[in-house]
Image (cartoon, grey):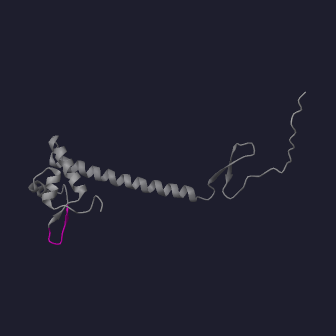
Amino acid sequence: MDETSPLFVISVAAELAGMHPQTLRQYDRLGLVSPTRTAGKSRRYSMRDVVQLREIAQLSAEGVSLEGIRRVLGLEDEVQGLRARVRELEAALADEMLNRPGRRVFAAGSAGEVVTLKAGTRVRRENALVVWRPLEHE
């Protein structure tokens, strides 16, 4: 189950939203909230529908007309869709950056500095021999 699962009959949804069932029928006719219909044509409201009904009640209490509410809800749906699309595009871009040939790879150089390499190459190691001799104390 998720927030879009049609669970509530109209009387329960009306109670959860703090409205009269007839108000929910009117909002359905106006297209403000569109509950799922069963095979017998009865309405089933999801938790998302109930939240939307509460938002409609709040906007109405603030003096927004039903047409204004319809516009606000439409814009909110559009913003939600656009945000989902941005997430999809960000994921696709991240995948592309990781899979792009010639992407940058970093390694530590011999002195500890950061060295940029092309993908598939290795850091050259020096084969010089370093002899350590402790300092003599006088």
Viewer-side residue, 11 vs 85: 11
In the rendered image, residue 39, in percent from the top left (x then y), is placed at 17, 72
Residue beneath the point at 26% across and 62% down:
5
Report the number of discs: 0
The answer to whether residue 37 is magenta is: yes
Look at 23% across and 59% down and name the residue there. Answer: 46
Q: Quadrant of residue 121?
A: bottom right
Residue farthest to the bottom, as pictured: 39
In magenta stretch: residue 53: no
Residue at figure coordinates x 15%, y 58% from the top left: 12
Chief secondary structure of the magenta portion: loop
Residue 132: give x, y in percent of width and height. 86, 41
Spot the residue most to the top.
138
Q: Give the x, y percent position of residue 18.
A: 14, 49
Reply above or below: 61 against 53.
above
- The range drawn in magenta is 35-41
The quadrant of the rendering that contains the N terminus is bottom left
Residue 31 drawn at (x, y percent): 18, 57
Please tell me in which quadrant of the rendered image residue 26 appears. Answer: bottom left
Q: Is residue 68 left or right of residue 113?
A: left
Q: Nearer the viewer, residue 55 or 103?
A: 55
Q: Taking 23 as reference, is 79 left or right?
A: right
Q: Quadrant of the C terminus?
A: top right
